[in-house]
Image (tube, coloured by chain):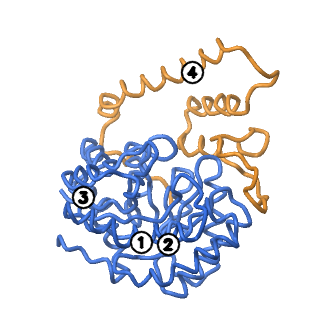
Amino acid sequence: MAETGFSCPQTREQVINMYFLEHRAKLLDVAAFLDRLDRARPTASNVDFREAALNEAVRILVDGQPQRAKRILALLSDSTTEIPQSAHGMKGASGAVRVNSGGAS
Amino acid sequence: MKYIDPHVHMVSRTTDDYQRMALAGCIAITEPAFWAGFDRSSAQGFFDYYRQLTEYEPRRAALFGIQHFTWLCINPKEADDPGFAREVIALIPDFLKCDNVLGIGEIGLNKNTKNEKIILEEQIALAEKHNQLILVHTPHLEDKRKGTRLIMDALSASQIDPGRILIDHVEEHTVAEVLDRGFWAGMTLYPDTKMTPQRATDVIEMYGSERIWMNSAGDWGCSDPLAVPKARIEMSRRGHQMSLIDKVTLDNPRTFLSQSEKFVLKAE
């Protein structure tokens, strides 16, 4: 199952006209979130794995390659193969994995 | 305009929502059994829930001309205790005879554990024994891709035709594998953890409109029971043909669900 080229019925100009302001606002939300992090006192010496994952995801946004959403979701996915016996004591989903745990593959 | 919302948890919604959905063109819904936001303390709690799904909700939906169908199971979040889960599963066969029960669902995995997988396999076997359709829940967030693959492997180990199984909550990183393996795919339009109408429309553009549907999965969380008509508007304003919009929000759900002889639309 592969992507098809030029499958959006709109021209690039039409897509920009329709969605630019919405995504300008979303981009500013991300920028303000990163600024907020900078203004917040650290509680640990290490960067939180979710913050590190977000920084990696931002690189995908601007790398000029296709399938950005799919690649970001893959980056944020658990790539381990172990299956624990029980969920007892496990925390809820956090939305990211430690980048060095294999999630980026 | 008519549409079907094939995955919405109306036990968590108000009667006003039924009215708003009817005004937006909803003619039928299907409601999978799911986690209530807290763990039930006994199998009897599920017995009452199944009665709600098979007796009360169809009447409430009918007040607004909406047909109500349902799916029964123990959901994966409460399936991590196999002994308890088996008590609940034992209740299901009697309810499968009810007029609005289409199959087993939403079964799947939550934290991708061995215990959850054991109960998933036993519920797949239940569906196979009773020749039922299956609706699958896939885990959220970082657990989704791994869980989806584990679930598909468990389903493929059965003799059930993948064309009788819909795997829900797909996103950009799971949709292709689901379709490639012959299953149906569901996209859930949910504000925080799943898809937006814009992204769902992107997926249709990238992966096509065969064996795929959209649903709101409206429930007790921040969700929108009008998400499907909003996705129709999103597709329309992008310039997609009405035939394509109808296909993914009406025709495809009808095609999949009509594999159960109980799914007959009165509005047609």
Quickly name the residue at label 2.
Answer: B47
Q: Tag 3: Cα neighbours inside 10 Å, few (<14), some, or many (≥20)? A: many
Quickly name the residue at label 3.
Answer: B26
Q: Quadrant of the C terminus of chain B?
A: bottom left
* Tag 4 near tag 1, CB within 8 Å: no
- Amino acid type of the residue that numbered disc 2 sits on in the rendered structure: Phe
Label 3 sits on a secondary structure element that is: strand
* Tag 1 near tag 2, CB within 8 Å: yes
The image quadrant that residue B87 belongs to is: bottom right
- Check the image and report above or below for B157 versus A11: below
Quickly name the residue at label 4.
Answer: A33
List x then y, in percent, for residue B173: 57, 51
The chain shown in orange is which? A
List x then y, in percent, for residue B29: 32, 63
Q: Which mark is residue B87?
A: none
**Numbered disc in front, either 3 or 2:** 2
